Amino acid sequence: MPSAAARTPPRPHAPRASSTNRRTDVGPCFWVSPAGHEYFFRPPGVSDGAILWQLAKESGGLDLNSPYSYLMLGAHFADTCAIAERDARPVGFVSAFRSPMRPDTLFVWQVAVSRDERGQGLAKELLKHVLARPACRGVRQLEATVTPSNTASAALFQALAHEMGVPCRVVPGLTEDLFPGSHEREDTYVLGPMPRPARRHAGKTMKTMKKRGETS
Ligand SMILES: CC(C)(COP(=O)(O)OP(=O)(O)OC[C@H]1O[C@@H](n2cnc3c(N)ncnc32)[C@H](O)[C@@H]1OP(=O)(O)O)[C@@H](O)C(=O)NCCC(=O)NCCS
């Protein structure tokens, strides 16, 4: 059977797409769900802003932000955001950014998956995909806020922490009184600390340096 990459025609913005199931690349790539559905993950562009807005609107569980703010995701935060397509149809996205004041923290702003595509691990995989990108090198924790009634969102972040083998703490976040009008409080989910990447062959490097007289 031909590979996923071989079956899908190459796109101009994804010259070297590969499967995240094989994790050979963290650029635009394919992921095949356990049910056998194939998804294409890529960073959003400015021209995806209206699509992201539409996905957020249809998701049913998100505060809908202004269309302008979704355009800004592609314009300024593309390397920490991802859009998922199935058969070239947008079906989900993650918007996130590294906290300017705490760059070791990836703050996940919104996650949405089309109703028909839910329950296959797509949201979790999109988050793992963003975390694996070079733009997230040095990220030690992930944060998101979740309203107490959003059990799907809470389950998503707990499942992600479990799969990554890191703790998930729930700490006080945004209280109701901070919002204009009525709004549930938002608890902060903190996943981490994430392990630092292994320093491969560190011992060997040290030995080599000693041999060369580069250490005292
Ligand atoms: C939350 C949302 C993004 C989850 O998308 P999804 O692709 O169905 O999630 P996944 O399939 O990756 O599920 C991840 C985990 O959460 C669990 N989960 C997902 N939806 C769930 C639900 N409604 N109830 C209980 N658990 C749920 C899954 O069982 C899975 O756990 P597992 O790995 O232990 O099996 C989706 O329901 C959605 O778009 N909701 C509306 C928007 C929203 O509320 N976004 C989150 C706030 S930012």
Image (tube, helix red, strand yellow):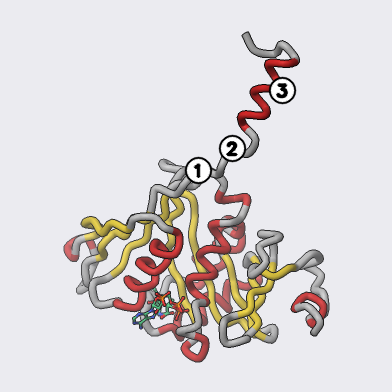
Spot occupied by residue 83 in the image (x, y as percentages of width and height): 59, 72
Q: Circle 2: is it few (<14), some (14-19), or many (20+) Cα within 10 Å?
A: few
Residue type at the position of mark 2: Arg
How far apart, in angstroms, are the residues tagged by discs 2 and 3? 15 Å
* Earlier residue among tags 2 and 3: 2
The residue lying at 81 percent from left, 70 percent from top is 12
Q: Circle 3: is it few (<14), some (14-19), or many (20+) Cα within 10 Å?
A: few
How far apart, in angstroms, are the residues tagged by discs 2 and 1? 8 Å
Q: Label 2 belongs to which residue?
A: 199
| 6 relative to 71, above or below | below
The residue lying at 26 percent from left, 65 percent from top is 186
Residue type at the position of mark 3: Thr
Q: Label 3 belongs to which residue?
A: 208
Q: Nearer the viewer, mark 2 or mark 1?
A: 2
Q: Label 1 belongs to which residue?
A: 196
| 152 relative to 166, above or below | below
Element at badge 2?
loop
Q: Which of the four quarters of the rendered structure image does ligand 1 lie in?
A: bottom left
Spot occupied by residue 90 in the image (x, y as percentages of width and height): 61, 81
| 192 relative to 63, above or below | above
